Image: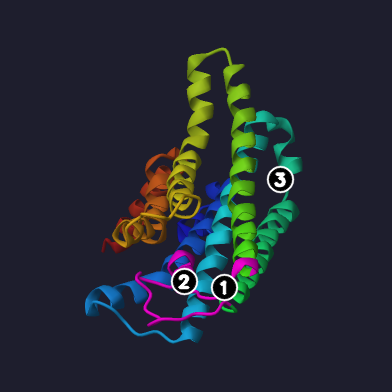
Amino acid sequence: MIILIGKNRQLHTPMYFFLAHLSFVDTCYSSVIVPQMLAVLWDQGAAISQARCAAQFFFFTFFASIDCYLLAIMAYDRYVAVCQPLLYATVVTERVRWGLVAGAYVAGFASAFVRTVTAFTLSFCGNNEIDFIFCDLPPLLKLTCGDSFTQEVVIIVFATFVMPACVLVILVSYLFIIVAIMQIRSAGGRAKTFSTCASHLTAVSLFFGTLIFMYLRDNSGQSSEEDRVVSVLYTVVTPMLNPLIYSLRNKEVKEAVMKALSRSRASGRP
């Protein structure tokens, strides 16, 4: 997706600018987790130092937070495109695009830094075995002992700020989008307008659905096996599906793919 967007001028629009960054973050997001996950699955467990565990937790939280912010930014972009089409070019300028993306990276770093420092100043006891496939927050909290109320409050506050804040932006944006679509008289016009948002809405549902299930629920009585399955969904499956969602459900991307394939075939002919 990154190469396709970079080479095709037709895709040099704000929506695809944000999509290129989302693809980059998804790649980094999975790359932080997959090597450790494969090692655990291959050896039925793997040793990891506390420093490596903290680094993995930081980068995982960093890229996951940016993913949340980018999906919220893309929802705002769709709101402006649908509800204020005549002002779109003046509202979502290149400067605004870079400012929003830079803000997402800075906010992601701040969230990851605070959560990592807070999580790894907790007191751990017992055999220090993480019953999971990578260093994530729920299994780490199960290893804590002593008074960890303050640290847990800080972690929960940041978690409940990032996710619900992004979900709120997305919900409000799509509420205005739905109202605008309902005001279109022709059924064809409504379907065409909604199709521009379908890919993003699918990606949002997959990503936030699994995250909410994992983090904003009561963990008592839940099996570690169930948590592991859900973690694979939001760390591996969802980032892998995002390019397919945006390519298979988007006419412009499909046309760009076909053009790229036809060019490669033509260049390969003698």
**Rendering coords of residue 149 (x, y %):** 61, 66
The percent coordinates of residue 107 (x first, y second) are 67, 62
**How many C-alpha atoms fall within 10 Å of the one at disc 1: few (<14), some, or many (≥20)?**
many
In the image, is residue 267 part of the stretch drawn in magenta?
Answer: no
Position of the N terminus by quadrant: bottom left
Magenta residues (range) = 122-150
Q: Secondary structure at mark 3?
A: loop
What residue would you read off at disc 1? 119
Spatial distance from mark 2 to mark 1, Cα to Cα? 8 Å
Could you tell which of marks 1 and 3 lies nearer the N-terminus?
3
Residue at far top of view: 185
Three-letter amino acid code at disc 3? Val
Count numbered badges in the picture: 3
Residue 142 at x, y percent in the picture? 44, 69
The residue tagged 2 is: 140
Kindly state the secondary structure of the residue where label 1 is placed. helix
Towards the viewer: 117 or 260: 117
Q: Are marks 2 and 1 in contact (CB under 8 Å)?
A: yes
* Amino acid identity at mark 2: Leu
The circle drawn on residue 92 is 3
Inter-mark Cα distance, 1 to 3? 37 Å
